Image: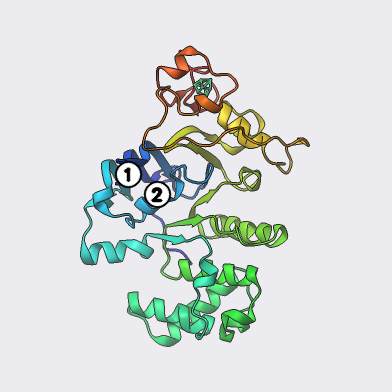
Amino acid sequence: MSAARARPAGTPIAEIRDLVVTYPTSRGPLKAVDGVSLDLTEGEFLGVVGESGCGKTTMALTLLRMSDPGRVTGGAVKVEGTDILSLRDEALRKFRWEKVAMIFQAAMNALDPVKTVESQIVETILQHQDVTKEQARDRVRKLLEAVSIDPARAKSYPHELSGGMRQRVVIALALCLSPSILVADEPTTALDVVVQAEVIRTLKELQRGLGLTVMLITHDISIMNETSDRLAIMYAGKIVEVGPTSQIISDPQHPYTEALLNAVPVMGSGKADVRGIPGNPPDLVSPPVGCRFSPRCPYAFDRCREEEPPLVFGGKDMVACWLRSK
Ligand code: SF4
């Protein structure tokens, strides 16, 4: 259902380099994303994890060119080799949703209540693609099947569907133009644990079945075990650890990742006790000197409060911590 891919396996489909996104505030500039570099490999399921306000959503919006270009004060973003920060007008309209689509937080509440599922998706397809209404309807049926909804429900209105089904309709809507990359921003926040697992499973099946590249943004690292291929951990506008999910879950290298894991029960990890992370994330208008996690880190030492650790290979994965680098 997604467009045929002609790129070799393992090729970066998206490249974010030294990205800086700055918002003006009454107290001065706030760097929501501060020097982030991250590749997204074609066909992978990448989890981006961090507490609220760490820059995950801002980074993802830039990938979709949905943040104001003026806010991008440094770096570059390429998708399939195209510099997306320079796209304008029609090229930008075609890029957005046809190359990269996004599911926003609480998006299921944004479905039009007076239109059927079918009419909402058909409308979007016809706005972007030169196909007949019948071809668009046929595509809706296939999309609903792909997200495990009986195509007979195409004539349903959103209020006639459960929360989990509405969220899967939102996923179908996001996929209706066959994007290469699907970004899902906290897609399960409003759902109970069972339905949450179903939605995550649907995303995983789409990644495997359609060869879709998925970036799932969440504050909840516990849903990533057995779901994502890789994890990128964000803290205070920066990436502090990147590596294979199994490696990070079983042997986190950064104290913040360790704290995130200690704060939740992680399925399959064998860990039972849960401990909250002390303190709060820093004010990004005036972040701490040195390591931004130092005020909350139980391992902090003098160098941590003076020099910022770079993101480097620390023996097991990429990590920004003086405990793992010289
Ligand atoms: Fe903790 Fe220092 Fe590592 Fe930062 S650099 S996470 S303060 S040990």
Residue 20, percent from left and from top: 32, 40
Quarter of the figure that contains the C terminus = top left
Residue under the image location 49 percent in, 27 percent down = 319
Residue 238's quadrant in the figure?
top left
Establish if 123 lies above or below 233. below
Q: Earlier in the sequence, mark 2 or mark 1?
A: 1
Residue under the image location 46 percent in, 66 percent down = 174
User: Is 91 situated left or right of 14 in this image?
Assistant: left
Dot 2: element: helix
Q: Is residue 208 visible?
A: yes
Establish if 76 lies above or below 288. below
Residue 298, percent from left and from top: 60, 22
Disc 1 Cβ-to-ligand 1 distance below 8 Å:
no
User: Is 163 situated left or right of 109 in this image?
Assistant: right
Mark 1 crowd level (few <14, some 14–19, many ≥20, 10 Å Cα)? many
Residue holding disc 2 = 58
Kind of residue sitting beneath label 2:
Thr
